[in-house]
Image (tube, rainbow, N blue to C red):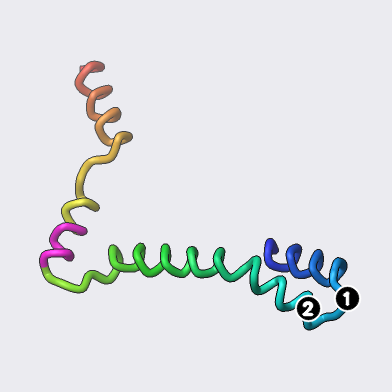
Amino acid sequence: MAGACILADQLHRSDSVEAALRRYEQIWQPVITDRQRTVRETARWFVPNAAWQLHVRRGALKAPGPSDIDRNRGAVLAG
């Protein structure tokens, strides 16, 4: 949706479709590049490149989160 809004704005402001598309690409390309980089980095957690990375991921996923700790603490306090 954000890209569509930017494109619509550029089409409204520009004298030609070609100029609007050039400006749209100038505005939007850094955002897309950043999002693609983030996705690639995140994907490494789901598809590790090495066995040691897989072990780290498995350990991180098995580690108790804050809600697990609070639940356990509540059970101990409640008896």
Tag 1 residue: 15
When asked about the image quadrant of residue 27, the answer is bottom right
Element type at mark 1: loop
Labels 1 & 2 near each other (Cβ < 8 A): yes
Q: Which mark is residue 19?
A: 2
Q: Residue at x 54, y 68 (%)?
A: 32
**What percent of the width, then of the height, locates residue 54?**
17, 65
Tell me how far mark 1 sits from mark 2, CA to CA: 7 Å
Using the rendered view, name the quadrant where residue 64 is placed.
top left
Decide which of 11, 22 is in the foreground and name it: 22
Amino acid type, residue under disc 2 in the picture = Ala
For mark 2, give the secondary structure.
Answer: helix
Q: Is residue 28 above or below residue 56?
A: below
Q: Position of residue 59 (x, y in %)?
A: 16, 53
Considering depth in this image, is 75 or 51 the residue closer to the camera? 51
Q: Tell me the magenta residue range.
A: 52-57
Disc 1 residue type (three-letter): Asp
> Dominant secondary structure of the magenta stretch?
helix
Q: Residue 63 appears at what percent x and percent y?
A: 20, 45
Quick one: label 1, few (<14), some, or many (20+) residues within 10 Å?
few
Frontmost residue, 43 versus 26: 26
Left or right of 7 in this view: 14: right
Instruction: Tell me where residue 15 sits by quadrant.
Output: bottom right
Q: Residue at x 72, y 72 (%)?
A: 23
Quadrant including the C terminus: top left
| Residue under the point 20% across and 73% down | 49
